[in-house]
Image (cartoon, helix red, strand yellow):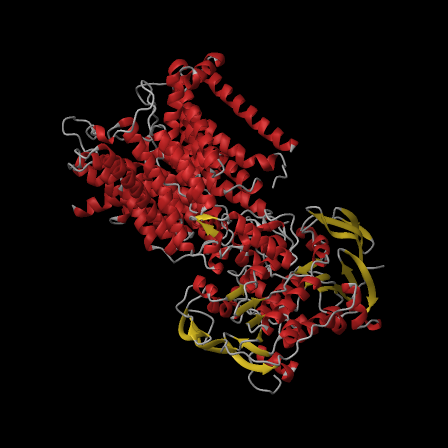
């Protein structure tokens, strides 16, 4: 009996962690290249809205996912433009982006669907159980009987591990974020690499946002992401910008959310806010515990200018 | 110089065009919408007072944000610090209802400042002593504070006579003076203006302010020159949070007179934009807060009369900041 | 036909000409020096050749063909390689990763470590440059890092190799090793350009010299046919004034600055003992990265020590803060004036009073007394001849020399008892350098204990009464000025304690 509870708790953890992990992987790529994007909220919101809209219009999952990716990439490229071309303060650029997309997605949603009393909804993606793997006791159900997004997540983690640590591309990415001057004089196009990294951030973040509408909720509303973008940033730091580490960090945070829901359903007189606080408190505590370890890319957040005297 | 003027002109034009476009997309009539916008901010004494009322918490919180920014402490937590200030005055009013008004006023200001200050001090200490990024910490504390309010108005600060989650009406001794009946204008505005003057003196005329600014510009050089960086980061976070805490006190004491959820429509985040627009300078902040408040009040008026959604204000604000960030680069302005 | 011809190159930055109508030709298979003092325009010219900057006007021809070099990528494609003064290596990557950075080797995008190591080894053997491909660059010594930089350039088939101030950070022995490498390169048919301001190097290794002065050509000679005096006068435009450091006829009562068996916390220093008597200049000679900066920081209080004592005239300093030590009269000139010494976006007044703003003489009623601040700054600016548009100009816009003079005015102007000067004349032109040197000598005759940390051996030898050699955080030996033997000094700098040659 307890095993079933544990298994469903783990499954819930994975579901809570997935959108955060996807967005966090994107941000990891961006930060490794030296660009810090606080606007992950905007990327996820954009991905969430546009995938919802596309699903509603076309009924086709692939189109919807693609739309979500485009939405996320669009948001990220605005940030890239501000950070790389305009050399703006990346924190402020990210905040401005969050405001913009909060308003934009609300506005577009209202425009498309008007003020209805019933929320327009779409059918969510069903989970697909992987043969053999899903039969492993306890963790099998939790890890391998999930929706396709989760499998994409696993694949991305593996791909990124190979990319970062086994290919020349990974070395280039690292060099651009650590010592852009060294990369430049070696003939690497620093800005091109950073733009690509930002695009990747948008793609993955858009997927993370799409997850929320296509899999988790089936509907969209104003400020759907409610801070998940910021939590993704924490997962990046906790995971020390290592794809596997980031996944684990997201799972830890996801477990806090799953716990919150579990406690709520158990029913008590404690106000629900005490539980919704949980993920945020956990992230602050875990952040404090991780202090002193880990190393930021030396050029993180700093615009690169070749002509700098 | 010409390029600078041109760039500002283009900025304003783009913003106007986008606003018109958004209004048109909703299907509203542009002239009518604009008219209701302007009526909303200047069509009557009440309207103008509304703008001032809205500007007050923005001003206070933005002053706080600017003090932090200048020291290199990116305070994204003004929202949470504001709520802490609100909680503190609510607690004070509920626990000591018989306190005479002058004492109540004094204590609520001090307590509100300290509560907000404490909420910012946590990330401030973490940054000063352990080098942890204050950006994420302050954002997390925002969400924690909002949830804290939700808990308190349902439990220890709850009004027992109502089924709804809110505190009881606070005693009259907590109220700020109403400046212009029947408008909602209250003494919070005076508090904000006084704080603006004090922040100006602090940052630009005192040694403390000088050291804070120097730390914000080059902490390493300060360390080598004997200026204690940690000390100033901590003081800065305290003052930064304290001013936002005062914003919370002002909203309760001048406007709502009880604690409810959602008293802040993202004032804390808006304050960051105000501070940016005002170039982290008290004088600029006063004007910028009036501007943003006008945008908010006007857009609400537009919604009431013409059905234009208020999310338009959010879009415009995001756009304004983006334009500011990109202006110099796009127009190749060679400004100092 | 010359391998390279740069004609009538013009380049300006913010209205100031860095290169004005400069011509430069390089023949095939020669080692050519680009000589000039700091700020003459040498590095700018080479950065234009390497594609980091684009000339405002003028043209570049390689083997007679005009070329356009818009980025380092173009330069590399034209087989031009550059080893910069500040190494362009990624410290968190290995030697192999740095050498092959951005290159599409076999099996791209996957990294075939064995293959790459093999080709690196072949190159190593050919040019006699030993490197360990698996080592993390951040853990290598400066001399080793320079070898990696040269390998990087050779790995990309550079035929024309530019070296910017290559000997600035090397011991005398390492300089010899470098020269052997350069001769090997010449044998293999490469053409080498060395940017330098050291005349003895030019005479030792080069075939021809082009001299730049104040952004223009000042002369062009064949090394064999010239002399130190000729080069010096071309470089400076006047006769070099030799600084006179006379021994002082009197001694001082103060015990000066004493460091006793200090050990820094988790750090590069210790156990270190050193004595800097009042009225003397003690020069610290050593290869960059052997604890010089840590030594300075420990004396100032910026870095903590775990054990040992630091005393000033008998009074212990270890537990005092930076502020308290400065109040006792210790001045600090850091080697990194932009990061450690100045707040670039603040004006001249604010920077001058950076550490003094809370002194009672500058405040009245808790507010800053702007009048007194103005007066004090005006005095300093005129006394030290600091050229600035106004006192409200952000210090960012001052020239390097004037920035340094401002720091000198601030740190040394108040009759300090101790001065810690790190690379005080780095990046300064001859005029400013002479001024700083004479200020240090004046302080010495007033009884100040001066600790001079510099990688410029000439500077150390000229100014110091005693020379202490630092190696891996300890003092190897302290030599009297008159008893210095260059070979012995070089050995000490490299860590060898005996008089036998390595």
* Front residue (pair A163, C434): C434
Q: Is residue B328 left or right of residue B93?
A: right
Tally of numbered tags: 0
Q: Quadrant of the N terminus of chain C?
A: bottom right
| x, y percent for residue B292 | 44, 28
Q: Is residue A14 left or right of residue B22?
A: left
Q: Is residue B23 left or right of residue A150?
A: right
B59 is higher (above) or lower (below) than C137 = above
| x, y percent for residue A299 | 52, 52
B157 is higher (above) or lower (below) than B230 = above
| x, y percent for residue A162 | 47, 53
| x, y percent for residue C21 | 80, 52
* Front residue (pair B75, A38): B75
* Residue C431 visible in the shown view: yes
Q: Quadrant of the C terminus of chain C?
A: bottom right
* Front residue (pair C361, A149): C361
């Amino acid at each position: 009996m307890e095993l079933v509870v544990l298994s469903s708790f783990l499954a819930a953890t994975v579901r809570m962690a997935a959108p955060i992990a996807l967005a966090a992987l994107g941000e990891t790529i961006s930060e490794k290249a030296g660009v810090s994007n606080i606007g992950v909220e905007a990327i996820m919101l954009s991905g969430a809205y546009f995938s919802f809209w596309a699903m509603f219009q076309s009924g086709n999952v692939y189109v919807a996912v693609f739309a979500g990716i485009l939405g996320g990439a669009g948001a990220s490229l605005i940030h890239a433009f501000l950070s790389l071309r305009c050399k703006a303060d990346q924190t402020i650029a990210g905040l401005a982006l969050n405001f913009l997309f909060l308003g934009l997605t609300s506005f577009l949603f209202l425009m498309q669907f008007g003020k209805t009393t019933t929320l327009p909804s779409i059918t969510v993606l069903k989970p697909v159980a992987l043969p053999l793997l899903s039969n492993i006791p306890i963790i099998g159900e939790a890890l391998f009987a999930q929706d396709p997004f989760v499998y994409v997540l696993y694949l991305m983690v593996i791909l990124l591990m190979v990319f970062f640590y086994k290919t020349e591309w990974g070395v280039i990415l690292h060099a651009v974020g650590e010592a852009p001057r060294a990369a430049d004089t070696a003939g690497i196009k620093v800005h091109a690499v950073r733009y690509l990294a930002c695009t990747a951030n948008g793609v993955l973040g858009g997927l993370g946002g799409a997850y929320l509408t296509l899999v988790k909720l089936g509907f969209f509303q104003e400020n759907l992401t409610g801070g998940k973008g910021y939590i993704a940033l924490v997962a990046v730091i906790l995971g020390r910008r290592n794809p596997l580490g980031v996944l684990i960090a997201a799972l830890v945070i996801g477990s806090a959310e799953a716990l919150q829901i579990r406690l709520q359903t158990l029913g008590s007189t404690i106000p629900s806010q005490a539980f919704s606080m949980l993920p945020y408190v956990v992230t602050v505590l875990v952040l404090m515990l991780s202090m002193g370890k880990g190393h930021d890319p030396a050029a993180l957040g700093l615009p690169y200018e070749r002509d700098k005297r | 110089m010409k390029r600078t003027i041109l760039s500002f002109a283009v900025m304003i034009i783009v913003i106007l065009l986008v606003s018109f476009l958004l209004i048109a997309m909703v299907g509203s009539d542009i002239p009518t919408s604009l008219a209701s916008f302007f009526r909303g901010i200047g069509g009557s004494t009440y309207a103008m007072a509304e703008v001032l009322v809205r500007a007050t918490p923005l001003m206070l919180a933005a002053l706080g944000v600017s003090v932090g920014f200048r020291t290199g402490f990116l305070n994204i937590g003004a929202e949470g610090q504001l709520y802490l200030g609100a909680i503190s005055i609510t607690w004070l009013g509920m626990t000591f209802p018989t306190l005479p008004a002058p004492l109540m006023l004094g204590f609520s200001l001090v307590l509100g400042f300290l509560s907000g200050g404490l909420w910012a001090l946590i990330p401030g200490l973490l940054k000063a002593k352990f080098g942890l990024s204050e950006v994420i910490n302050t954002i997390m504390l925002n969400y924690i504070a909002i949830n804290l309010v939700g808990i308190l108005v349902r439990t220890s600060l709850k009004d027992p006579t109502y089924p709804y989650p809110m505190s009881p009406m606070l005693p009259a001794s907590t109220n700020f003076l109403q400046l212009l009946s029947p408008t909602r204008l209250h003494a919070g505005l005076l508090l904000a203006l006084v704080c603006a003057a004090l922040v100006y003196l602090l940052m630009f005329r005192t040694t403390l302010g000088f050291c804070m600014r120097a730390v914000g510009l080059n902490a390493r050089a300060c360390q080598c020159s004997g200026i204690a960086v940690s000390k100033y980061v901590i003081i800065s976070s305290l003052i930064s949070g304290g001013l936002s805490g005062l914003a919370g006190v002002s909203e309760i004491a001048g406007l709502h007179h009880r604690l409810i959820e959602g008293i802040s429509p993202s004032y804390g985040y808006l304050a960051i934009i105000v501070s940016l627009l005002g170039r982290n300078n008290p004088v600029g902040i006063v004007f910028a807060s009036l501007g943003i408040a006008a945008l908010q009040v006007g857009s609400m008026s537009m919604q009431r009369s013409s059905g234009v959604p208020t999310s338009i204000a959010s879009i415009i604000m995001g756009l304004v900041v983006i334009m500011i960030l990109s202006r110099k680069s796009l127009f190749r302005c060679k400004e100092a | 036909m010359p391998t390279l011809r740069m004609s009538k190159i013009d380049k300006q930055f913010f209205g100031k000409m860095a290169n004005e109508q400069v011509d430069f030709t390089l023949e095939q298979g020669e080692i050519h020096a680009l000589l000039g003092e700091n700020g003459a325009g040498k590095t700018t010219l080479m950065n234009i050749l390497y594609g980091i900057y684009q000339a405002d006007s003028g043209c570049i021809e390689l083997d007679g063909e005009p070329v356009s070099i818009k980025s380092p990528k173009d330069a590399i494609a034209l087989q031009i390689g550059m080893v910069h003064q500040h190494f362009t290596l990624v410290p968190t990557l290995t030697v192999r990763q740095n050498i092959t950075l951005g290159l599409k080797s076999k099996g791209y995008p996957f990294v075939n470590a064995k293959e790459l190591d093999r080709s690196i080894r072949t190159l190593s053997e050919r040019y006699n440059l030993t490197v360990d491909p698996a080592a993390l660059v951040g853990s290598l010594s400066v001399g080793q890092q320079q070898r990696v930089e040269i390998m990087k350039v050779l790995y990309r088939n550079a035929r024309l190799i530019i070296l910017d101030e290559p000997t600035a950070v090397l011991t005398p022995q390492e300089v010899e090793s470098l020269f052997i490498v350069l001769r090997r390169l010449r044998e293999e048919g490469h053409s080498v350009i060395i940017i330098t301001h050291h005349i003895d190097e030019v005479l030792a290794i080069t075939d021809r010299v082009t001299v730049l002065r104040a952004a223009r050509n000042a002369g062009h000679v064949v090394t064999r046919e010239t002399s130190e005096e000729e080069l010096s006068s071309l470089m400076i435009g006047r006769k070099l004034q030799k600084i006179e450091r006379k021994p002082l006829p009197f001694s001082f009562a103060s015990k000066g600055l004493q460091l006793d068996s200090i050990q820094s916390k988790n750090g590069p220093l210790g156990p270190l003992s050193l004595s800097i008597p009042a009225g003397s200049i003690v020069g610290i000679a050593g290869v960059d990265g052997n604890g010089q900066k840590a030594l300075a920081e420990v004396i100032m209080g910026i870095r903590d020590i775990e054990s040992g004592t630091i005393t000033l005239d008998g009074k212990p300093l270890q537990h005092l803060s930076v502020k308290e030590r400065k109040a006792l009269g210790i001045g600090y000139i850091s080697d990194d004036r932009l990061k450690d010494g100045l707040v670039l976006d603040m004006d001249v007044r604010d920077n001058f009073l950076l550490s003094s703003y809370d002194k009672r003489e500058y405040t009245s009623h808790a507010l800053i007394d702007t009048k007194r601040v103005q007066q004090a700054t005006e005095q300093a600016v005129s006394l030290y001849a600091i050229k600035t548009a106004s006192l409200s100009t952000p210090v960012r816009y001052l020239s390097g020399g004037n920035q340094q003079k401002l720091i000198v005015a601030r740190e040394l102007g108040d009759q300090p008892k101790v001065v810690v000067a790190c690379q005080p004349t780095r990046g300064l032109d001859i005029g400013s350098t002479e001024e700083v040197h004479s200020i240090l000598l004046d302080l010495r005759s007033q009884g100040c204990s001066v600790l001079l940390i510099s990688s410029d051996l000439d500077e150390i030898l000229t100014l110091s009464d005693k020379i202490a050699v630092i190696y891996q955080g300890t003092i190897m030996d302290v030599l009297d000025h008159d008893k210095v033997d260059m070979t012995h000094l070089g050995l000490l700098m490299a860590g060898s304690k005996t008089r036998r040659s390595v």
